[in-house]
Image (tube, grey):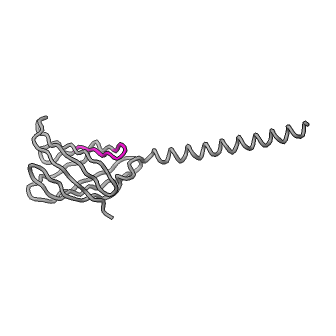
Amino acid sequence: MTAVLIRRAGTVRRLLMLIAALGVTAAVQAEGQSANPGRAALGTWRGPVLTDGPSGIMTVVVLQEAGEWKTTTDFEGDGIPPAGEVREFNVEGNVVTWVQTVGEFEVVYRATIEGDLMKGDLEAYQGGTMVSAGTFELKKQV
């Protein structure tokens, strides 16, 4: 009887160790997934930007280095003022937002990523007052 209990105790111990190991593996995988929830945003995006002011082609490059977003934009088109650094870049689920100074305007961008498309709108502010708005639809470049 004692031998049976010792064998069962050893089996229970091995089973508990296996469950603990699986739990640690699942936690590491979950941590790795949550460490980069914006993976879909990574890459180069390009397409038209249409505003009630200047319109043209916008390219957005989204990188992540050491957990920090590194995002740049480039605009092609007549009358589009020079753009400053991208600030406050954020990804929540499939929604991407950022702020950028373009000429004398503070521009707020908000987009949704659906597969290889980033569709969104922008609002341009001057002196705290919205003075222009627009939309953009960017395709992920391969």
Magenta span dominant secondary structure: strand
- Which portion, as a residue range, is magenta? 91-99
Give the quadrant of the C terminus.
bottom left
Q: Is residue 92 magenta?
A: yes
Left or right of 13? Residue 31 is left
Along the line of sight, the residue nearer the viewer: 77 or 110 = 110
User: In the visual, does 47 lie left or right of 92?
Assistant: left
Q: Where residue 38 appears, x then y in whole percent?
A: 38, 48
| Residue 22 on the magenta span | no
Residue 109 falls left or right of residue 33: left
**Residue found at the far bottom of this picture:** 142
Residue at 27% over, 59% down = 139
Q: Quadrant of the N terminus?
A: top right
x and y percentages locating residue 44 in the rendered image:
30, 59
- Answer left or right for 61 relative to 36: left
Q: Residue drawn at (12%, 48%), measured in percent from left and top? A: 103
Residue 61: percent from left, percent from top: 29, 56
In-front residue for pair 1/128: 1
Which residue is most to the top? 128
Q: Residue at x 59, y 47 (%)?
A: 25
Residue at screen point 87% across, 40% down:
4
